Each structure stands twice: as structure tokens, then as C-alpha cells.
Amino acid sequence: MKKLLFLLLIALTWYLAAMYHLLSLMVLAVAELLLWLGMFVLSRYFKRHISAGFPGEWVVVQKGQKTPCPFALQNTGRLPGGRIRIRFSWAYWNMAGEKSGYLYGGVEGGKQTPPQFYLNAPWCGMLTVGIASAQAYDYLSLFHARLKAKGELRVAVLPQGEAVKVALSRGFGDQPGWEEEAFGAAGNGGGEVRQLREYAAGDSYRQIHWNQTARMDELWVKERQPEQERAVFVYLDLRSSKRREAKELNAFFEVLFALTAGLLQARLCAHILWKEPGGVSVGMAVNSMEDCRAMLLRLYQSASIPDGNSEDFAEKETGLCLDLKLTLYEKGRLVFRFSQENYQEELKQLVLIL
């Protein structure tokens, strides 16, 4: 539209100059025509010297949060850039029923601060962001030229939810399927006092039993029973007769996150295990929320999620098991079956008794 109006302005100026034989209007018409040609050349100059891309390959965001994603413009020319129009596209990675959309952002070239666009991912999982088109306009926005665009951004969308309430029954840890491993040096950690003994080199002064020391007139220390680390095995059954949509996998990731977070709050170590196609076993020990996020990132990239052809775990009868249908088992016994529509409310109400 601007181009058409500018052409009409040139034609009108030239017409008036010819009708009234005014040299000034003729000079103005020639100047307008030269400006037209100059803007066309300028747009091609920007095409040659300005490129668009992503400064990195990875970014981690949380579901439901509007997060700025880094984006870079490089201008190798001496002239400051005009208006830049970038159209982004994003789609979930290797998932059936991919959802895609477009993000528009106008940024000015020549700025010192790198431009950013904002992403609000609706589901958990891995998605890729690419540049659908990048255009540079001249200073009057009459012409535009397609810019060189390179690279893509991989975005890992992590869950943001509440932890499942976990209650430990009496005798927990003595049941088959739960593992306890001793840690720490005897006499230097916590736990119950097992016996008193004479002080030996290397013992901590914090463990000195002062009453016995005063009675015996020599140093005696408390020897404690080492504390135990309680570990829970969680098997992920990733077998599926069909490729799961991104929305279905989102529910699976959120249930897994809530379950793992609940075990951590109960001071349990969660050992998450799953199998990839070909029977390759993958296991990760989760002792903190950082470990939980790392486990999800590893699971997002697992080839077993898109294909769903992994083998079954024969050992899942000895611990917890969660499958892609959102069914939770404990030692082969059904605990709860979550629904795709109401799993968030069900997670808040569930109390898992181990």
C-alpha cells in the first residue's frame, strides 16, 4: 500500500510540474524517484549484511510461564538497519498430533540489546522453534528483502505442579522392592547411639560423651548406628500401541513429576528406570529437584517416547510402576488410574501410602 501511494505521489508531482511548467516540482519529482530507487537498493543492502539466528541451541522453560527466548541479529554493514520483521514457528518434537503456531515480532536493527521473543508453551515436553521467515525493510518500509536465517532452538518445557502426598507405613524398608544402603562413617554421622567406646584418632570431637569421659578420666565417644538411605524404584512402562499426542504425554510427564517430587518430600531417593527400543535400560537416581529436572530432560530425548515400542520390565512387580495410560501400580497392584481431563485435581487429592 505504501508503495502504491508513493508511486501516485511521484506521478502527481510530475503531472503538476508538466502542467504548470514548474522547475521546482520537476526537481521534486526526480528526487522522489531517486528516493524510490534508493530505498530499493537499501533493502538489498540489508539483505546482504543482516542475518538472523539463535545464539544457543538449548533453553529450559516451565509450562504455563511466559518466558523470553534468546534471539540474535547480526549486522555486518555500516548502515544501521531499518525495521526487521521475524516470523517464528514452533512445534513439539517427534510427537504425534503436533501442535504448531506462529509468533510475530518486530525489532529494530542497530540496537545494542539483543531482541527477544516470548514463548508460552502449553504442554510439557520437547519442542523446536525455527524461523519461518525474516525480512528487512528500508527506512520508509517501501521494500523488503528476505534475510539469511540459520539454526533452530530446542526448548525443554518442564512441569510446574504440586507434589503427591506420600505417607510411609510402619515397617517400610523391610518390604521386598525397597532398598536401603548405609552411608557415612561410623561414629561421625547421625542415627541412634549403639555403644560407647574409647576415643580413637580420627573420631569427631562432636561425638565425645562428656559424662563418661568425666567418670573415666579419659576420652570416650558415642558410636552411632549409621543412618539408612531409603530408595524407591519407579519403573516407567512406555509401551504403547499408538503414538501418543503431545497433550497425552504432557499428562504423563506431570504425573511423573508430582510422584517424584512427593517421594523427595518424604526424604526418599527415587530410582527412575525405563527401557528404550531394543531393550536398552536407562536408570537415574533422583535425590533432589535438580536431579528430577535432569531425569525429565533425559526422558524427553528418549527415543522410546515417540515410538512406544519398548520392552516390559520384569522387575516392576517389586516397586512402583507408571505407564503411559496414567495408571500407577505398586508391586503389581493397582493404586490409582489418573484421567487425562482431571489428573491435576486427582494429584492434589491422592495420598500414596508406601
Image (cartoon, grey):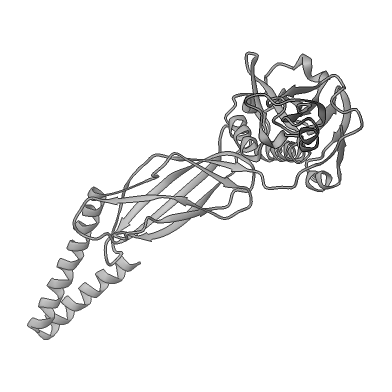
- Rendering quarter of residue 296: top right
Q: Which residue is painted at 59% across and 48% down in the image?
A: 121
Question: Which of these two is toward me, 93 or 256?
Answer: 256
Work out which quarter of the rendered image holds the C terminus and state it.
top right
In the figure, residue 334 lies in which quadrant? top right
Does residue 52 lie above or below 176 as drawn?
below
Residue most toward the front? 217
Q: Is residue 231 left or right of 42 when viewed as pictured? A: right
The spot of residue 314 in percent (x, y) is: 77, 14
Relative image position of residue 248 (x, y in whole percent): 71, 37
In the image, taking residue 347 as reference, residue 93 lies left or right, namely left
**Along the viewing direction, whichever of 47 and 336 lies nearer the viewer:** 336
At 77% from the left and 23% from the top, the residue drawn is 180
Residue placed most toward the observer, 100 or 222 = 222
Whether residue 279 sits left or right of residue 6 in the image: it is: right
Q: Nearer the viewer, residue 323 or 16?
A: 323
Q: Is residue 25 left or right of residue 284?
A: left
Q: What number of labels is visible?
A: 0
Q: Position of residue 275 (x, y in %)?
A: 67, 20
Q: Quadrant of residue 185?
A: top right
Q: Can you give x and y, in whole percent of width and height, for residue 281 in the image?
A: 65, 17
Q: Quadrant of the N terminus?
A: bottom left
Say which residue appears at 31% left-offset and 64% top-offset. 141
